[in-house]
Amino acid sequence: MQLGKGPIVPVDRLEHSNGHTYEKEPTIATHNVLVNARSLSPPQRLRQTLKFDPEYARWREPFGDKACMPPFKTAHEIRHFNNTFMRAVWALIPPQPSITRTKYMCSSYDGAHIEVVRFAAAEQITSHQSSQSAVLYLHGGGMVAVSVEIFAPQLAKLAADSGVQIFAVEYRLAPEYPDPSPTEDCYAALQWLSTHAAELGVDPTRLGVMGDSAGGGLAAGISLMARDRGLEPPIKKQILVYPMLDDRSVYNLSTAPHPSPLADFATLPISMLKVCWEAYVGKEKAGRADADVSPYAAPGRASDLRGLPSTYIDVGGLDVFRDECASFAARLAAADVEVEFHLFPGVPHAFESASDTGVTKRAIEGRIRWMRDL
């Protein structure tokens, strides 16, 4: 839904399905957008019960505790689990015979060679008209795991379903390559795509950036970079799928006076997210409000969001990234950036694993609509 319309409703209590009610810092909801509302007077109260979406709950039931990631303590443990699990999940996606993969190379800020993989139909590859749109896709994995090769079945399906060609970046991972390498790798790929657009049959004015989870954070980061570094033509749209935006959020959740009710639903343990952020921006910086963490690494820290491209954001109502996504969407709207924000009730992070549920179908429809509108 478009932001900036509809009633403003204060929210300062969350009632968990176990009957406990948790106090929250007062917030306001503009439709589905939560923003700080300490100044509201007099405060009103809204009781919200958190529970799984019925369809999602039925899908999840056979998995039990296996539906949640174990609380790993090292980035390499997270990488091994994520790579193994995601490879198995994406391998279930049927092949897309209409989509061809082509590999290219670009140079990052430090001279490293970064692979960019194109997912496109034959007619898109052979087209001599430089009028096609394209999406630069940045995969998730907490900045420490997964690869384009693992993600390829999902990317091929997305390219086939949307009719929009995708260029996916094999950016380097933390902890071996912490900030700024992942973001700079992705920005180098964006520059490469923009520079070589004509020979690839792409209109550089119709480029979008897209990513899920950590990849959504990277997409937001390179949108900030493109604005600040004067990329021409500018990015047309950014599509952020439950993005990982702010290192401070998970630390705030873990130090709150009352345990967050989201912890009972989260597929991502808060302790594991801390490991990811520490691997990416440094243990001495992660989560500290006064730390010198680049807004390109943690876009939620950016003080100025003006001039960013039109933005789509979606997130589950039971996702640990819910509040940072809602805050980012509200701040974009306040900065006069066109933004469409969806908060899908009753589902956690990466809810599309339940592919046949109504909420998954609605989310994918929205993302594809934005891709097609490039």
Image: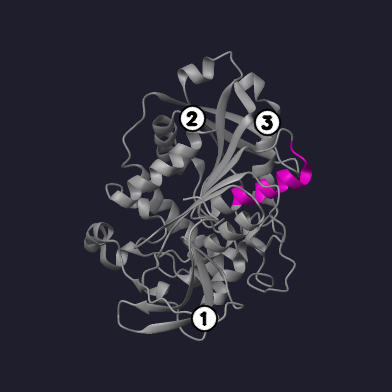
Task: Decide: is 332 above or below 137.
Answer: below
Q: Residue at x 49, y 39 (%)?
A: 370
Q: Position of residue 127 (x, y in %)?
A: 54, 15
Principal secondary structure, stretch drawn in magenta: helix
Q: How is the image coloured?
A: one colour
Task: Decide: is 124 above or below 285.
Answer: above
Name the residue furthest top: 128
Per the image, label 3 sits on a secondary structure element best described as helix
Query: Is 21 left or right of 168, judged from the image as shown?
Result: left
- Packing grade of label 2 (10 A; few <14, some 14-19, many >=20) is many
Q: Position of residue 367 (x, y in %)?
A: 45, 42
- Does any portion of residue 321 appear in the rendered image? no
Disc on the earlier residue, 3 or 1: 1
- Kindly identify the amino acid type of the residue bearing the numbered disc 3: Ser
Q: In front here: 93 or 174?
A: 93
- The magenta region covers 218-231
Q: In front here: 352 or 54?
A: 54
Q: Are marks 2 and 3 in contact (CB under 8 Å)?
A: no
Question: Where does label 2 land, which residue?
Answer: 164
Q: Are marks 3 and 1 in contact (CB under 8 Å)?
A: no
Disc on the earlier residue, 1 or 2: 1
Question: Where does label 1 land, which residue?
Answer: 43
Q: Position of residue 332 (x, y in %)?
A: 62, 55
Question: Where does label 3 land, which residue?
Answer: 194
- Does any portion of residue 148 appear in the rendered image? yes
User: For residue 103, what is the image quadrant?
Assistant: top right
User: How many circles with numbers are drawn on the protein?
Assistant: 3
Query: Is 257 left or right of 207, judged from the image as shown?
Result: left
